[in-house]
Image (spheres, rainbow, N blue to C red):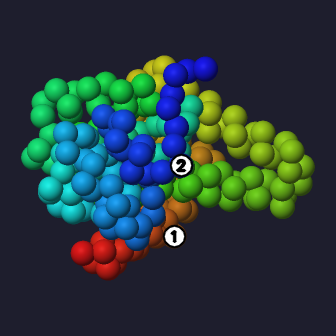
Amino acid sequence: RFGVRTSNDNVEAVEFADWVFIAVKPGKIKEVIGKIGDQLENKLLISMAACVPIGSFDYFTAVRIMPNIPVAINQGVIGLLINKNVSWKEHQDLKTFLELLGLVIDVKTDEELDLITIVSACGPGIVAYLMNIISEYSVQHGLSEYDASRIVFQTFVGTLAHLNKTGLSAQELIKNVATKGGVTETILRFLDDSGAPSILDSSFDAGCDRINIVTNLLT
């Protein structure tokens, strides 16, 4: 229908491709490259594998990207790291294509892309985790699961829409909502005093440590 050629054979697929996306677990990269490496001349290799450094692809014209799950609805964030073999045109053509899926952020190092992995690729899971905590609290204190999930969902959606329309920063919105002596200020002060920011920082650090461990195992 769309004129798309498909194949169950990686070597055959690479032969008729200009861009080659590799979307496998980090531990499978060497195996995949070993099979298709000879066919990658004059092609753009685009690795979506986390924790595999750009230096692993020095012999190819290669890019690392790190998308998050909202790219499925064209609302994603994609980190983009190119190696020295990528031309200006190849870079711009790929970036233009990826921008159809959301916000594209160019980075210069693996470390910056790893940070995008923590903040953005892991971000939807972290946001959903926080939503689930609020929803469970609501249910425990009397709301139905149905109402709780709808309320929490709309609160997050509405907050993002408000920020987008007004141009306020998150910090400015906090200041607007958390009036002195009010309920919101009480909740946020309790979170601060309980060490919530430090706990989140430590959880992000744990994610970074995991990336480093996996990267070291692969190199």
Q: Quadrant of residue 103?
A: top left
Q: Is residue 22 left or right of residue 111?
A: right
Query: Circle 2 — which element?
Result: loop
Q: From this view, report whether residue 155 is shown above or below residue 47.
A: above
Q: Residue at x 43, y 31 (%)?
A: 102
Q: Residue at x 51, y 28 (%)?
A: 4
For the residue marked with disc 1, what is the amino acid? Answer: Ser
Left or right, 37 with respect to 186, comes to left
Q: Is residue 185 visible?
A: no
Q: CA distance from mark 2 to mark 1?
A: 53 Å
Quarter of the picture holding the N terminus: top right
Query: In the image, what residue type sits under mark 2?
Result: Asn
Q: Nearer the viewer, residue 179 or 16?
A: 16
In terms of image quadrants, where is residue 137?
A: bottom right
Density class for disc 1 (Cα within 10 Å; few <14, some 14-19, many ≥20) is: few
Whole-percent x and y of residue 135? 74, 53
Q: Is residue 79 above or below residue 135?
A: above
Residue placed most toward the observer, 129 or 17: 17
Disc 1 target residue? 194
Outermost residue toward the left? 84
Check disc 2 and report the residue beneath it: 8
Q: Between residues 57 and 149, which one lies in front from this camera angle?
A: 57
| Residue 197 on image: x %, y % | 43, 63
| Residue 20 as seen in the image, left or right of residue 82 | right
